[in-house]
Amino acid sequence: MKPVTTFILAIIFTFTTIFTVSAQSPETIWLASNTSAYKTGETVLVTVNAVSGTPVQGFTFQIRYDPACLQPVNATSPIPGMNGLSLPQTTGLVDASFASTTPQIANGTLAEVRFLTLGGCQTNLTLESAALAIRNESGFAAPLAGVTVGEKTVPLNIDKAIGTSATQPVVGTPLILGETSAPDSSFPTWLLILLGILLSAGVMFGVYKLLGQGATPSAPKKLKSTSVATVQIKRGPDAGKKFPLTKLPCRIGRDPHNEICLNDPFVTSQHAKIYTSNGDYYLMDLGGETYINGMAIKKSAAVLKPGDTVRLGKNVYFAFGL
């Protein structure tokens, strides 16, 4: 009897597994975190995840947070070609959208979202809304139907003791969050994704038409660049201000004698400096907390490229441009 019993149990297990898998929604979005315990001054990393049987060209989500406990920092997407769209931010609500010009598989992590802990408290991060975007038969962006939202809440326990935030590599270009405050709008976020997709597609079509005209080839003219490197403060003191780097090396810190003075408690008096060598620009750490695109540089120098995002201390972010 034992072989027969084992065979029957195996059949029951197999059918149970099949029905369980088929009962799951093919399109699901949920919020997750690897840990829930933090100290003050540390970085909270949560992920927005999805399982989708349909390739998507964008996604959007809103995460509710307590501004007395947390400060949003940035969001990135590990999906190749998914670029963040800057949106006005409302205090207490992260509003993020990403779009791609080509369909992408969305099975796994859609985005990584980072927050800075501000003090001892017990709080939650809540996924208020989320959607996947596709291009419909008419060529327009539209929300994917039938998407369910799974786990919405991530509980956090933040100790008032000061902690040390570990270096967390950032994949992709960070979408800076929490810079501006604006009233709620009824304009659908997915329509903003549409604008981004159509704009990118229009640029690519224009280039294709230009190349297809068969113009007589001519030797390209090499223009000498006269642009001046700039530092634009994204968050912190003087947020929104742009500093042209007309004097190099350019020292950055809390000391008013620096070329760029930033009155922030987490910025040291001589925090970092920017200099040039052999036509390249470099950022050197002078003993503070200095990061380029999320990667720490400690008492060393690293090449600065246009579009790089630099963090000094806990709160100051600036973008390097040419």
Image (spheres, rainbow, N blue to C red):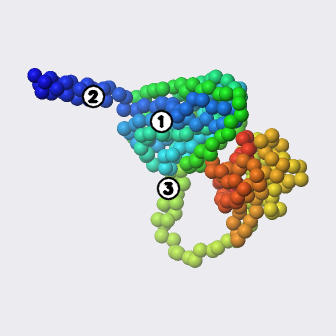
Horizontal side, residue 50 vs residue 118: left or right: left
Report if the CB atoms under discs 1 and 3 are less than 8 Å apart: no
Of the numbered discs 1 and 3, the one sitting upstream in the chain is 1
**Amino acid type of disc 2?**
Thr
Helix, strand or loop at mark 2:
helix
Q: Position of residue 103 (x, y in %)?
A: 43, 46
Mark 2, residue position: 17
- Answer with the quarter of the image where residue 50 lies: top left
The disc at residue 98 is none
- The residue to which callout 3 is attached is 205
Q: Which residue is situated farthest in the right direction here?
A: 257
Q: Amino acid at mark 1?
A: Asn
In the figure, 33 relative to 290: above or below? above
Q: Name the residue carrying label 1.
A: 49
Instruction: Name which of mark 2 and mark 3 comes first in the sequence.
Output: 2
Tell which of 272 and 61 is nearer to you: 272
Q: Are marks 2 and 3 in contact (CB under 8 Å)?
A: no
Measure the alpha-carbon separation of dots 2 and 3.
48 Å
Three-letter residue code for mark 3: Phe
* Residue at position x 61%, y 38% in the image: 114
